[in-house]
Image: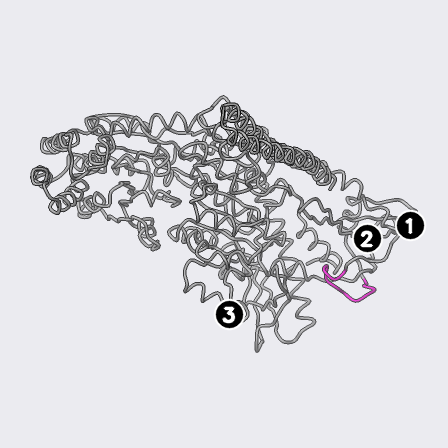
């Protein structure tokens, strides 16, 4: 344990005030989470400036954005910003987040996704369940439906998962996104998405508009300047790179185990009966009159009907039955009804699709490869049709342990597949957010129209944590118009996607019409797990020295990315994390023992037993567990009642009893540790008698407030001692110690009376270092303010130009009037009114522009 109360108090201050370079270490010290430099770089990017209103973390899917978000959440929590809201798109993903929190993190959380949970988290003292001493996790729908209650909380941090759903926020008709923006208010907004651009560049505009609508030009101006205007992307890059951070898999390969992706596209041939059905549908699509689809154009109808047929006969048959039923209720539709009944008969005559037969071959061959490479016998099959999903489940259930998922708050299907399932058949709802790295085999039974859906599907398995190379198989009928059109769109959008924000891997490839011949070739590319592990270890060995990667920054990428320059700044490597994390845990354990030993000495209502070997603290001999301290929740002081048992182990249960730097018990111990204001230490080996003082220096910049523990000293001979010299003295063995005053915790010490050592505090040096650290952020904020003023002035000019155009138009109308004196008088009156309004606006513009300049000058002085 610490030698004296002064040593314990000083160590507590150091643990509370870790330097910026180590701000994320408490997370890694308290769990077995794996550390990746690009994740630290992303979190550091988000926290780099006290002026920033938010950030978009848009790594390629599967790169660990949720862990990056948790680094930010933990850091804010450690800094005392406890009003944190995590919003997920739907309850489907809830279990995944709570599972991650339980396994890796110690910050408390509350789940609010329905009225039952609302009632469980309210009381007589608190009728608003959004007000909690914990992170609040909710869904988009529940938050928006309870906007008034959620807005009451002045959130410090709001985090939005799958934030691409927020991109239409700037549109008037998007009520939910606007409600969520109002809830977020002035909080720091952290948006997570692997697809910041899904349709076009306006998606990116919406994400940044959600953070701060003043950061970019107006919608129309932005649209005109950047939509399909790649020549202007460098200009746009300079603006959005301040708010967006993206890491590609290719950039992370030297740091993390990123396995390979192997692609196979099966060009199957439908059977004779299927081809006949296609011809019947094609003939109907091309006929001039269609009673069943009177308003749908030929192209859209072809994509719809032939797309369903491309999925499965079961999918198109369901639609055919609906069309027949609709035609039976229409007058003068007998001929078309007969035509569709013939189509229905043709569909019902098909016992099994040719594609289904090819699927059985692919599964058999694929599972054989999985076994050889050491991967689990698990495959994820994606389809766009629920009817196709049902058909496939019937086809496969007798052969494999088969499960189906098409969107549900019930996570049990996903959990069961992870544990012992062999085949998961999912609609694209399962392609959003779920981690399915237990499987290394993906099958696209249908092709979607959206390229990024293909990427999202593959990324469920091809992600960090995947131990095997991933096999991705797609099916296509090159004689089906819809399939061919989908293939064209995939190729086209891949080019756009890669050109705009970068993408590492293709989503389709390896085309073949002979499945059995293709698999021996595939087998040569899928590496055994042992070979993958060996290659990864070799990569770590090669690149671990400086923990960096040489990454060429693409000129056309719109986001700050994990370049060589950023990699050079991230000096925290796995070895350092393990060593320093152990040091922090050792220090925290020593402080914890000191705290509970002092409690046992001062109190008799409970005795805490300290187990040094297992690093646990157990409450004994109590009638009621005691209140150990009070802690600030963000709105009030709340009593903290002891748990029955505490532990330091990373897997200690319950989590509420785990002692970490971010847990309530850990933070409370550091905050409450006491010592006297003055005392005497007897250190026989010290070279000269001296005085040493501990100062807490608070640096404030914008919304940023940081505390720094600094030691200053002076020998009796007048020699000044800096922080390093004082630390070396403090580390020497102490023979005895005395305290001259009553002990008090850090938060009660406040400002003491002037002392001769005050002049030795290096405040000027510390402020200079702080200014140097913040100068890029300040320069960025000043530039943003200047751009905003320029935009406001431009808006004033546009109003004046509009009035000038109206005057000129009225003048032209006057000149066109001949002979009619009353009309000329009316036209002249209109011109006079417009000119008066123009002069008034001109004068107003002058003073408004002056006001904007003065306000800018005042803001820049602060």
Q: Earlier in the sequence, mark 3 or mark 2?
A: 3
| Range shown magenta | 738-749
> Which residue lies under the disc numbered 2?
693
User: Disc 1 vs disc 3: which is toward the camera?
Assistant: 3
Whether residue 629 is visible: yes
Quadrant housing the N terminus: bottom right
Q: What crowding class fits label 1: few (fewer than 14 Cα within 10 Å), some (14-19), or many (20 or more)? A: few
Farthest residue toward the right? 717
Farthest residue toward the top? 231
* Residue in view at x 49 percent, y 67 percent: 122
Drawn side of residue 560 relative to residue 697, left or right: left
Q: Quick one: 750 or 484, which is closer to the camera?
A: 484
Q: Which mark is residue 123?
A: 3
User: Disc 1 vs disc 2: which is toward the camera?
Assistant: 2
Q: Earlier in the sequence, mark 1 or mark 3?
A: 3
Residue 447 is situated, as x and y percent measured from the top left of the image, at 28, 34
> Which residue lies under the disc numbered 1?
716
Q: Secondary structure at mark 3?
A: loop
* Residue in view at x 48 percent, y 56 percent: 147
Residues at marks 1 and 3, CA–CA distance in whole angstroms: 61 Å
* Residue in view at x 64 percent, y 42 percent: 51
Q: How many marks?
A: 3
Whether residue 568 is visible: no
**Is 732 placed above or below 372 here?**
below
**Is 462 placed above or below 12 here?**
above
Do callouts 3 and 2 mark residues in contact (Cβ within 8 Å)? no
Q: For residue 724, which quarter of the picture?
A: top right
Q: Secondary structure at mark 1?
A: loop
Drawn side of residue 748 relative to residue 760, left or right: left
**Is 491 placed above or below 336 here?**
above
* Residue in view at x 76 percent, y 65 percent: 743
């Amino acid at each position: 344990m610490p030698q004296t109360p002064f040593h314990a108090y000083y160590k507590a201050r150091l643990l509370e005030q870790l330097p910026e370079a180590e701000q994320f270490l408490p997370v890694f010290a308290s769990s077995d989470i794996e550390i990746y430099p690009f994740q630290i770089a992303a979190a550091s990017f988000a926290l780099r400036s006290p002026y920033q209103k938010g950030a978009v973390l848009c790594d390629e899917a599967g790169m660990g954005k949720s862990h990056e978000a948790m680094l930010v959440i933990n850091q804010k929590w450690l800094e005392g910003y406890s009003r944190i809201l995590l919003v997920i798109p739907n309850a489907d993903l809830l279990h995944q987040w709570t599972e991650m929190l339980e396994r890796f993190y110690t910050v408390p959380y509350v789940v609010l996704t329905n009225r039952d949970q609302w009632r469980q988290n309210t009381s007589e003292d608190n009728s608003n369940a959004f007000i909690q001493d914990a992170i609040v996790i909710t869904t988009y729908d529940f938050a928006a439906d309870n906007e008034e209650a959620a807005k009451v909380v002045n959130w410090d941090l709001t985090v939005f998962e799958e934030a691409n759903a927020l991109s239409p926020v700037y549109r008037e008709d998007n009520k939910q996104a606007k409600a969520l923006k109002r809830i977020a208010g002035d909080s720091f907004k952290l948006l997570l998405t692997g697809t910041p651009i899904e349709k076009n560049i306006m998606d990116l505009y919406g994400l940044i508009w959600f953070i701060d609508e003043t950061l970019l030009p107006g919608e129309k101006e932005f649209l005109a300047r950047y939509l399909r205007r790649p020549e202007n992307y460098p200009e746009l890059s300079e603006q959005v790179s301040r708010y967006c951070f993206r890491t590609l898999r290719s950039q992370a390969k030297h740091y993390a185990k990123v396995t390979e992706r192997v692609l196979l596209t099966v060009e199957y041939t439908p059977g004779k009966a299927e081809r006949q059905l296609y011809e019947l549908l094609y003939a109907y699509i091309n006929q001039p009159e269609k009673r069943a689809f009177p308003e749908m154009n030929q192209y859209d109808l072809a994509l719809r009907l032939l797309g369903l047929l491309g999925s499965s006969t079961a999918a198109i048959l369901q639609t055919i039955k609906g069309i027949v039923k609709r035609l039976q209720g229409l007058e003068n539709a007998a001929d078309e009804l007969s035509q569709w009944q013939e189509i229905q008969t043709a569909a019902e005559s098909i016992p099994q699709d040719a594609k289904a037969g090819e699927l059985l071959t692919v599964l058999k061959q694929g599972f054989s490869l999985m076994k050889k490479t050491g991967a689990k016998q698990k495959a994820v099959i994606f389809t766009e049709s629920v009817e196709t999903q049902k058909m496939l489940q019937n086809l496969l259930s007798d052969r494999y342990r088969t499960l189906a998922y098409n969107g549900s708050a019930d996570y049990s299907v996903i959990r069961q597949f992870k544990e012992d399932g062999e085949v998961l058949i999912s609609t694209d709802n399962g392609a959003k957010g779920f981690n399915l790295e237990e499987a290394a085999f993906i099958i696209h039974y249908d092709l979607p129209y959206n390229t990024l859906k293909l990427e999202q599907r593959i990324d469920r398995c091809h992600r960090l944590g995947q131990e095997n190379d991933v096999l991705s198989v797609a099916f296509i009928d090159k004689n089906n118009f819809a399939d061919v059109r989908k293939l064209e769109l995939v190729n086209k959008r891949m080019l756009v996607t890669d050109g705009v924000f970068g993408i590492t891997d293709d989503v389709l490839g390896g085309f073949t019409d002979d499945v059995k011949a293709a698999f021996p070739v595939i087998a040569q590319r899928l590496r055994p797990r042992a070979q993958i592990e060996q290659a990864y270890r070799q990569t770590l060995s090669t690149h671990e020295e400086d923990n960096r990667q040489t990454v060429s920054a693409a000129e056309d990428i719109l986001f700050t990315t994990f370049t060589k320059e950023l990699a050079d700044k991230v000096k925290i490597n796995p070895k350092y994390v393990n060593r320093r994390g152990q040091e922090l845990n050792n220090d925290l354990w020593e402080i914890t023992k000191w705290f509970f030993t002092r409690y046992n000495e001062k109190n008799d209502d409970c005795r805490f037993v300290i187990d040094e070997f297992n690093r646990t603290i157990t409450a004994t001999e109590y009638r009621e567990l005691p209140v150990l301290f009070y802690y600030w929740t963000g709105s009030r002081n709340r009593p903290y009642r002891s748990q029955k048992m505490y532990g330091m182990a990373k897997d200690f249960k319950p989590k509420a009893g785990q002692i970490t730097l971010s847990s309530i018990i850990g933070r409370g111990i550091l905050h409450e540790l006491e010592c006297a204001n003055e005392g005497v230490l007897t250190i026989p080996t010290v070279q000269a008698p001296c005085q040493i003082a501990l100062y807490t220096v608070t640096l404030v910049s914008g919304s940023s407030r940081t505390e720094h523990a600094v030691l200053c000293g002076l020998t009796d001979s007048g020699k000044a001692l800096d922080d390093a010299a004082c630390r070396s003295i403090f580390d020497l063995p102490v023979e005895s110690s005395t305290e001259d005053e009553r002990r008090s915790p850090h938060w009660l010490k406040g400002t003491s009376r002037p002392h001769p050592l005050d002049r030795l505090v290096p405040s000027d040096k510390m402020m200079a270092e702080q200014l140097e650290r913040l100068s890029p952020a300040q320069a960025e904020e000043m530039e943003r303010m200047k751009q905003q003023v320029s935009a406001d002035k431009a808006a004033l000019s546009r109003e004046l130009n509009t009035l000038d155009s109206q005057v000129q138009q009225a003048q032209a109308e006057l000149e066109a009037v001949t002979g009619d004196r009353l009309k000329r008088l009316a036209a002249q009156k209109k011109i006079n009114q417009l000119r008066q309004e123009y002069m008034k606006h001109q004068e107003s513009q002058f003073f408004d522009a002056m006001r904007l300049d003065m306000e800018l000058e005042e803001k820049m002085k602060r």
